[in-house]
Amino acid sequence: MKTMLETLMTVGYGELIVYGLIINFGIYIGSMGLYTVLSNFPKARKMGNQHPITGSDITLSLITVICNTFVFLLGVWLWKYGFIQLSEQQQWWRVLAELLCLTVIMDFLMYVFHRAVHFVRQFRKLHERHHQHQSTNMLSLFVLHPIESIGFGLMMLAVIYVVPFSAIGISLYLGLNSLWGTIGHLHHTVLPPSWLKLAKRGYICTSEFHYLHHQHPDFNFGFYSSVWDVVFKTVHPGVRQ
Ligand SMILES: [Zn+2]
Ligand SMILES: [Zn+2]
């Protein structure tokens, strides 16, 4: 990781843009691959028909990849010029603690902002495009208004600005974010039905949990955990059964 950081510190902007595009297109293609594998999992149960993939979905998802690349470049720039400090954690348990800490902080912030974009009229328009997918498809995770994509990135950079995390911790968090975002947007459920009860208890968000949000947008705002939905009583009744 140190060599990677040294490379990022010394390369020019042209190469940085290429690195950013490779990383973010890698995440995009990896998410679609995982979606396909999980959807064809022998025990996968279909929750509804796949939302048709349109030309506009493809264009918007590619714009999201560009936005994510922009956030990556901004993050590297802020780090290069000392605005963002990275911790030097190398011990595995400290890195895992960082991953947990970053996930918990982002989980709360994402619940707050997700709920805000649903209920504040001025923000609602931004999120409407994502909710045109009443069911989901392999691109749903990336079908976002550019302000939403950049807003998520800036929120993460703000957290990293306040609390120095290590590059490994941040990378693991971004990996988890892609993994959970992909699982959350499956139109199949690959976890046993009893796992939905974990969502009810405030543990984790499952595919069904977020699928219900696409069907009933006034409920289930959580992304990683459903704890804030439980606390603020926004869990869909279908989860409580
Ligand atoms: Zn969604
Ligand atoms: Zn929503």
Image: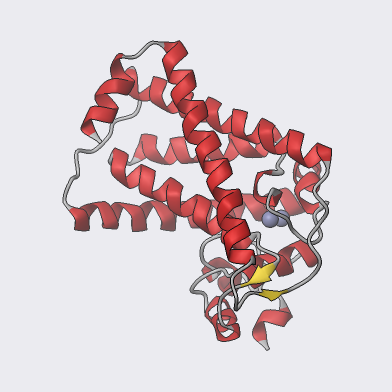
The reply to whether residue 141 is in sight is yes
Along the line of sight, the residue nearer the viewer: 49 or 117 = 49
Classify residue 217 as left or right of residue 163: right
**Above/below status of 39 relative to 56:** below
The reply to whether residue 165 is in sight is no
**Above/below status of 196 relative to 17:** below
**Above/below status of 87 relative to 39:** above
Along the line of sight, the residue nearer the viewer: 228 or 207 = 207
Residue 72: where, in percent of width, then height?
47, 29
Q: How many numbered callouts? A: 0
The quadrant in which the N terminus is found is top left
Residue 83 falls in image quadrant: top left
Classify residue 112 as left or right of residue 75: right
Residue occupying the far bottom of the picture: 241
Residue 169: where, in percent of width, then height?
32, 46
Residue 146 falls in image quadrant: top right
